[in-house]
Structure formats: C-alpha cells, structure tokens
Amino acid sequence: MAPVSNNFALPALPRPACQRPFSPNGHYWRQRSNVENTGALKDIRVIELGQLIAGPFCGQLLGDMGAEVIKVEPPGQGDPMRNWGRGDDKLWWEVVARNKKAVSANLRIAQGQELVRKLIATADILIENFKPGTIEKWGLGPDVLQAINPRLIIVRVSGYGQTGPYSSRAGFGGIGEAMGGWRYIVGDPDRAPSRMGVSIGDTLAATYGCMGALAALHARETTGKGQIVDSSLYESVLQVMESVVPEYHWSGYIRERSGSFLPGIAPSNVYQCKDGEYLIGANQDAVWARLAAAMGQPELAKDPRYVDHVSRGRNQIELDARINEWTRTLTVDELEDLMIEYSIPAGKMYRAPEMLADPHFAARDSIIDVETERWGKLKMQNAFPKLSDTPSRVRTPAPSEVGQHNAEIYGGLLGMDESEIAALKAADAI
C-alpha cells in the first residue's frame, strides 16, 4: 500500500503554564498546566521507580487517568527509555513519560533510599519493576514501606512473579511471551516463531498491574489498607491465550503457527488487491452470505463446502484462494466500498501515515498534538480509554531533563530547603 499524506491538522495542546513549587503559605502546589486535569485519578499520587518498559507504561496509564506521577530516576543518564525508539530520533520517551514529573535519587546509597522513603510516605501507589528482592535490598521492601504508609498500594511487575522457583531469574517481555505461550503460535508454520513488532509482553504486564492498582484502590475504600499487586510478564501473556490450556488438557490439541489465518475460522484473512492488501473477517454465517453476494456469487453461501462454520473451516485453504482470486480484480478502495455497502467487517492495513490521514482518527482525537519541550509539536496517541464524565488527558509533556522537578518535589512536597537539596546533590544522592 502506498504511503498517504497527512491531509488534516489536529489542534495543538497548549504548552503547560509555568509551574511554581510553593504557594505563598509554603504548601506544595499540585501539578498546574493550561490543560485541566479532569481524570478519575486526579487525587491519587504515584511514585514510579520502574525503568524500561513495563513500569513506565503502568505509570503512563495511571498518569493519563489523572494521577500525579512522580518518576524517580538514577542521577545522570536516567531511565534508559529516554534513549529508546526507532529511527534517527528516539521519541518513545515522549509518550511513556507524559503526565509525569521527574526527580532523581540514587537508590544505591542510604541518602537516596531515605529520600525515596519520604516520597513514598506521601503516596497512594508505588510502581516498581526490578528483579524480585532488589527493593528489599535497598530498604524499600513492602514490609518497610507499608509500616510507614499502611494505605500504600505496591505494584510489582517482574518476569516470573514475586514467588515460585523462577522468581529470582532475570526476565524481559520477550521471555514472558515465550513462556506464556504467545511466541510459539505466532508466525508461519515453516519458519521460526515470530514476534510482534511492539513489546506486547511488557505492556500487558503493565496493563494488568494498572488494573490491579485500580482494584486495590477500590478495596482500600473498605479496608483502609493498601496491598501488593503482583503482575508477572508470563502470566499477563497467559491471560490472553484464550483456550490453549484447556484444549490441550481435554483433548491433547496443541495450537500451532498458522500464519495470517486461524485454523477453522473462515473466511478471515488478508487478501491481495491490485494495489495492496486488505483484511476481511466474514467467518459468521450471515456475514459470509453477504460476502458471497458482494462477490457476485451468492450461490457459494449454499455450497455444501462453505454452508456453515465447520464446513468453511474444513475447506479454508480453497475458500481463501477463491476469495483472493476475486479481490485481485479490485483496488483496495473499490473493495472497501463493497465491504461497507454489504456491511462486512473489513479494513485496510494501517501504518502511521494512514492513521494520520484517517478522518475517523481525527474525529475521535485518537491522535493528538503535544507540545514537547525538546521536539516542539509532536503527534502521538491520545489517552485511552475514554471516560464520559472524568476524561483522561495528556496534560503535560515528558520531562526533558533528569531531576527536572527536584526543586518542586523535594522543596515543595517534602519541605526541604535549598541547603538540604544542595547537600543531597553533593553526596550524589540526587
């Protein structure tokens, strides 16, 4: 499919107003910007200790929903996510660190650990995605932190969970995808397992961590106590593996790689057109009948080879070949017009250029302009999901500097004076 131009402009979000750490009476000022915080979690404070993908993405989700997220980074280089992304310019940070404030703290020395304990004492949620046992080694284990702050909810994301014989192993998202069953079934059957082009294992674990935090917030309303959310990479993947386990347990069936289609689900595949590829999902009986009519071959809906779900699944390869022979006579746009006319679920294969040019994305503000500190106006995905009464928003850009909000957080929230902050800096604690 040929690239398309970006033929519409999205409204720019205003640059955040200047923030000041103190009110006239010395109290801490909550995040202030020209974009109103209407989120459901606007009275929740989150401390994010995690690095790389899963911890920061969990923080992004909570921040988009209105939480005040204070991201703690090691002094100097900061979170490696600042330098992650594809292409010449690394832009992932601008998405994953939006709606966050950045402070620096050296968790490997006593002064940094004490500083973070003071921050956590003010928080509702702590996010960490270090190897199990790491925060305990730093004097930041759940027993210590919940003694200081009994209402604290601790989201712990790790490769294998906080318990079990593998808990001490190092784990990355791709390993969780393999262990959870995802990698084995993705790709073509005559090739090695493929991976998705995004870090799905990490983002699933982060999403389940966020979901657990929201459930724990609700439970705290009754109990008054926080709890630990244990979100492992492999179990997060396992949760979306449909009936893979019971299919094997009951009948010995093991799902295998099948490429662009699911065995027995037909027709549902990517088909070739004159000028590109197009996805059609017409595997339900009534929808298949409409597709047969759109093809000008309504008799196929009554053909014994294709008359019902089981029959179409049994003859899936030849049915796909028949449909593909027809779609090759049409352009993508001609085929899409027919699919809309006959009310058949179908769609183009989108990349970023197509997303930016699509009027539906624009009408729903699926992609917005964010005024970033380093790159100027930058397009990115909007906050999601959409809530009718307490909408999530991108309120502030990602902090461009490590420790950018040290004065605001340590001075305002923790009440430290300039000399105390300077002493921490001199000790390499921040």
Image (spheres, grey):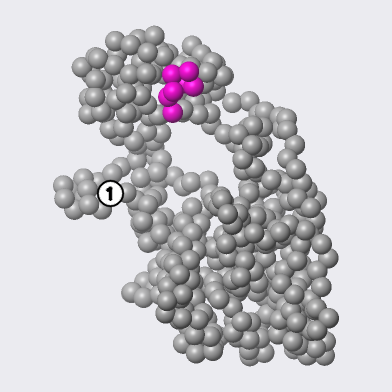
User: Looking at the figure, which quarter contains the N terminus?
Assistant: top right
Residue 172 position within the rendered picture, expressed as x and y whole percent measured from the top left? 48, 62
User: Looking at the figure, which quarter contains the C terminus?
Assistant: bottom right
**Residue located at (56% from left, 51% from top):** 388
Badge 1 element = loop
Residue 2 position within the rendered picture, expressed as x and y whole percent measured from the top left? 63, 25
**Residue located at (67% from left, 55% from top):** 394
Residue 328 position within the rendered picture, expressed as x and y whole percent measured from the top left? 47, 15
**Residue located at (46% from left, 75% from top):** 221
Q: Is residue 319 magenta?
A: no
Give the magenta part as a residue range.
339-345
Q: Is residue 145 left or right of residue 246?
A: right
**Residue located at (52% from left, 53% from top):** 199
Quarter holding residue 138: bottom right
Q: Residues within 10 Å of mark 1 (few under 14, many from 20)?
A: few
Outermost residue, left side: 251
Residue 266 visible (yes or no): no
- Judging by the rendered image, the residue that carries numbered circle 1 is 243
- Looking at the image, residue 145 lies above or below residue 236: below
Give whichever of 82, 414 is nearer the camera.
414
Q: Amino acid at mark 1?
A: Ser
Outermost residue, front side: 389
- Looking at the image, residue 391 lies above or below residue 137: above
Residue 302 visible (yes or no): yes
Residue 215 position within the rendered picture, expressed as x and y whole percent measured from the top left? 44, 67
